[in-house]
Amino acid sequence: MNKKKILFIGGSLNQTTIMFKIYEHLKSDYDCYFTPYYTDGFVDFFVQKGFVNFSILGGKFRQLTEEFFRNNNLNVDYKGLADDYDLVFTCSDLIMTEKY
């Protein structure tokens, strides 16, 4: 039987660490993946242009989150595009994406 899949959406390093703590309790029973905080729709235009690098959507915040993923050998699925997930954890209500 295949394990159910969980996606954890990071943000600032603090938010990502919170997601990691939850993951540590679930990792043996579920297939777990992480993504940096992201957006879709028209706001993504501003992300691509670097206009929001002062926020968790880019810049140093995003770099620290991605570094945390690498340092902890976490599975990454950017924007959760590679699969469908049974459960999604996010640590912010700043932007809610269409997919989740």
Image: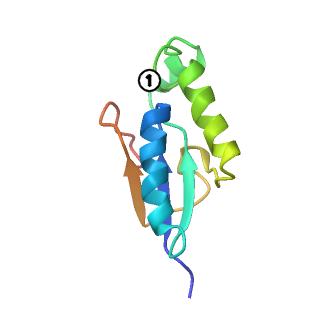
Kindly identify the residue that appears in the image at 63 percent across and 27 percent down.
63
Q: Is residue 49 above or below residue 26?
A: above
**Residue appearing at x 58%, y 20% in the figure:** 60
Asked whether, in this view, residue 56 is left or right of residue 95, the answer is right
Residue 69 is drawn in which quadrant?
A: top right
| Front residue of this view, candidates 49 and 30 | 30
Residue 80 pos. (x, y %):
54, 51
Check disc 1 and report its element: helix, strand or loop: helix
Which residue is depicted at the point 54% across and 74% down?
A: 28
Q: Position of residue 37 (x, y in %)?
A: 48, 36
Q: Is residue 70 left or right of residue 89?
A: right
Q: Quadrant of the N terminus?
A: bottom right
From the viewer's side, name the closer residue of 35 and 71.
Answer: 71
Picture layout, residue 33 above or below residue 45: below
Residue sitting farthest toward the bottom: 1
How busy is the neighbourhood of tag 1: few (under 14 within 10 Å), some, or many (20 plus)?
A: few
Q: Is residue 39 at least partly visible in the picture?
A: no
Image mark count: 1
Read off the residue under disc 1.
43
List x then y, in percent, for residue 96.
34, 38
Give left or right: position of 74 versus 91: right
Residue 57 visible, this angle: yes
**Residue at the spot 38% in from the left edge and 43% down from the top edge:** 98
Look at label 1 and name its amino acid. Val
> Residue 13, percent across and down?
50, 33
Q: Which quadrant of the view contains residue 88?
A: bottom left
Relative to 15, say whether 88 is above or below. below
